[in-house]
Amino acid sequence: MKYDYLIVGTGLFGAVFAHEMNKCGRKCLVIDKRNHIAGNIYTEKKLDINVHKYGAHIFHTSDKKVWNYVNQFCEFNNYINQPVAIYKDELYNLPFNMNTFSKMWGIKTPAEAERIIREQVAEQNNLKPKNLEEQALSLVGRDIYEKLIKGYTEKQWGRECTELPSFIIKRLPVRFTFNNNYFNDRYQGIPCGGYTELISKLLNDIPVMLNTEYKEFIAKTDDVFEKTVYTGMIDEFFDYSLGELEYRSLKFEEEILEGVANYQGNAVVNYTAKEVPYTRIIEHKHFEFGTQPDTIITREYSKKWSRGDEPYYPVNDDKNQKLYSEYEKLAEARQDVIFGGRLGKYKYYDMDKVVAEALSLCEKEI
């Protein structure tokens, strides 16, 4: 058969692109190596709870066009991300705000909080921070850094903060109001019924092949594709010919707690002490204000990526960006292949930016 597009990956980028091109009469075939659609935003229903199988995903955006677009396919609830952090036996609100500062220093007013942070920052005397630790200290001072940034960041990236580049945290959100809303975006929520339903609606009436590896499929198929939209790892596409890009991977440890209606009282709890091996615990029912008699939690561990692992976060330091730019040249030479999404572009994207990029690509193609 002849298709206009082979789309590799049923995640948000591939699904939006396939939907829009199909709507315009272009013939699309979508494949995915996993046994389910939706990529890393896949949600699986267990005990009537939508479990985020590959980590927590909260849709947030200030782009009304994108918000209206995704709301065509499913209703979003009014979930607001308000994570908390546990450091040893202390619990703090995130992002850093007056609730955080009041708990940490026993103060009540913004002026008191500003004075303490200003004094601690002045102690550093770092005009040009050379690494992440110096950058963080120059922004928020030692107390916040030691309790809420250092251990969590070192677990997340697998390196000491003194070995991480300063640009990772060019800014840190500090609010001198009692506001626990993690995001500043105008629109925020979780799809009612989970993200899998959203992707299912996007891919309705489009042929999808699961358990299908791209290169194995291409080697065996007699089908003809005018173009390929590739959302996998760009270095893997080119057989790592220039070397491996670095990624961070994740390990998930899921636990069903029967008879426990509420384990931690919040959807997301970060564990910032380095001696705690996991970075956070997700209690899935709280994303949709669940009242089920049981609960499901997931402990999330950050780990180094190796071939065969799922890549989650590109390591966008200077060395990797230089290597990616070389792969980008190879990609530009392939007029028959379009690279998109977090792995195809080797860039950390929030979900709304993925949708916007896919819609922009569709406009160009049409």
Image: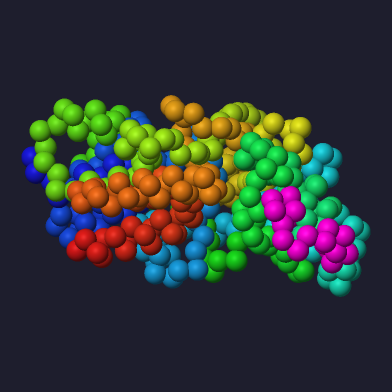
Is 349 drawn above or below residue 154 in the view shown? below
Residue closest to the far bottom: 111
Q: What kind of secondary structure does the magenta stretch mostly adopt?
A: helix
- Residue 276: x and y, percent? 74, 33
Q: Quadrant of residue 281?
A: top right
Q: Quadrant of residue 262?
A: top right
Is 194 on the left-hand or right-hand side of 150? left
Q: Quadrant of residue 126?
A: bottom right
Quadrant in which the N terminus is drawn = top left
The part of the chain drawn in magenta is: 117-136
Residue closest to the far left: 1
Is 209 on the left-hand or right-hand side of 169? left
**Front residue of this view, candidates 170 and 361:** 170
* Residue 127 magenta-highlighted: yes
Is 96 on the left-hand or right-hand side of 121? left
- Residue 177: x and y, percent? 76, 69
- Residue 325: x and y, percent? 40, 50
Q: Is residue 97 visible?
A: no
Quadrant in which the C terminus is drawn = bottom left
- Residue 101: x and y, percent? 83, 60
* Residue 105 magenta-highlighted: no
Q: Residue at x 60, y 58 (%)?
A: 80
**Front residue of this view, candidates 92 and 80:** 92
Q: Residue at x 19, y 48 (%)?
A: 336
Colour scheme in use: rainbow
Q: Is residue 169 visible?
A: yes
Q: Residue at x 62, y 40 (%)?
A: 157
